[in-house]
Image (spheres, helix red, strand yellow):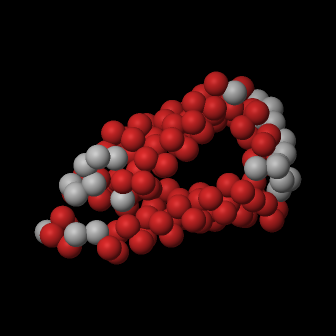
Amino acid sequence: MKPLLKLTGIIETATGLGLMAVPSVVVRLLLGSPLDTSAAVMLGRVAGAALLALGVACWLARDDTQSRAARGLVVAMLMYNIPATAVLAFAGIGLGQGVMLWPAVVLHAAMAVWCIVCLRRGPQNVMD
């Protein structure tokens, strides 16, 4: 679980910072079109703040993999990665595509599988 939390911490923190700083650029890389309203830019920044929070939480939990809180964090990341995979894949089918869209879909799918593997092999007494 430690490598999962470390990698998730790095990826989500970087993505969150990118969305907060230059949301239109990140969205252009994913979807092939920029955010074109101030409301969309603000929403992108709020999403960035949420990803930053998830990333920091994962990073801080990386050495505490036996706790219920760390396991709960992996469940939360699973609940994030599954819909993120679906939403991004749907965007790829129905919307424009940026250079990073399909790599992001594959990354989120792989991270979801990794979360499931970690949860299945984790200590059973943590959830008691």
Q: Percent x, y for residue 61?
A: 31, 45
The percent position of residue 8, horizontal first and vertical second, equals 48, 49
Location of the N terminus by quadrant is: bottom left
Based on the displayed image, in which of its 4 quarters is residue 108 positioned? bottom right
Q: Residue at x 63, y 32 (%)?
A: 18
Q: Does residue 92 appear in the picture of this structure? A: yes
Residue 99 in picture, x, y percent from top left? 82, 49
Across and down, in percent, residue 17 comes to 57, 30
Q: In the picture provided, is 19 more to the left or to the right than 79?
A: right
- Residue at the image position 29 percent from the left and 46 percent from the top: 63
Q: Vertically, is 70 above or below 126?
A: above
- 110 and 52: which is toward the camera: 110
Q: Residue at x 75, y 54 (%)?
A: 101
Give the position of the C terminus as an image quadrant.
bottom left
Picture residue at 85% right of the left edge, 53% below the top: 96
Q: Left or right of 128: which side holds 120? A: right
Q: Nearer the viewer, residue 109 or 82?
A: 109
Q: In this view, does 104 lie above or below 9?
A: below
Nearer the observer, 40 or 100: 100
How many numbered marks, from 0 up?
0
